[in-house]
Amino acid sequence: MSLAVTIKNLKEKVTDFFLALNQSDIEGIYESYHPSGGCWTSGNTLISGFSGRNEIKSTATAVLDLFPDGLEFSIDDMICEGNKVAVEAVSHGIHVSGKRYHNKYHFLFEFREGLIYRLREYMDTEIVTEVICDGRRS
């Protein structure tokens, strides 16, 4: 397989991941992860820290359920090198509280055997605390 095909395939996998996220497809999100994979979310919010693949379903469900009309992510830019894909993205949604949620992100995907091994998620954690965590810090 050529390097160009590998880069294209990894970018497609990331695009498919965001499609699953936008559709609140918990099974699709889960299946995107390597068996020993996981997601790390930046900051000191109630949703920060590391979630292994076995926790992905409950973590994703807990967050996505807070947005009854969906949480929409849009990719602004994507760069791939080796087994890593860097993404700049934005999200929009209406929280169950009625608060508008809009955040900017940097995601770093690391792949192993064609699946997400590590996902690192960076965003404005104050917005996460204010809207998703309803102002609670602990």
Image (cartoon, rainbow, N blue to C red):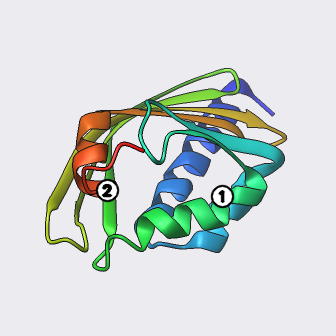
Closest to the observer, 132 or 120: 132
Q: Residue at x 26, y 57 (%)?
A: 134
**Please, what secondary structure does the residue beneath circle 2 have?**
helix
Of badges 1 and 2, nearer the viewer stands 2
Q: Position of residue 106 (x, y in %)?
A: 40, 31
**Please, what secondary structure does the residue beneath circle 1 have?**
helix
- The residue where tag 1 is placed is 56
Q: Is residue 113 above or below residue 78?
A: below
Q: Amino acid at mark 1?
A: Ile
Q: Which picture quadrant has residue 45?
A: top left
Q: Position of residue 36 (x, y in %)?
A: 85, 44
Q: Is residue 72 above or below residue 118?
A: below
In the image: residue 52, left or right of residue 65: right
| Quadrant housing the C terminus | top left
Q: Name the residue at the bottom extreme.
A: 68
- The residue where tag 2 is placed is 132
| Quadrant housing the N terminus | top right
Q: Residue at x 70, y 58 (%)?
A: 55
Q: Amino acid at mark 2?
A: Ile
In the image: residue 23, left or right of residue 118: left
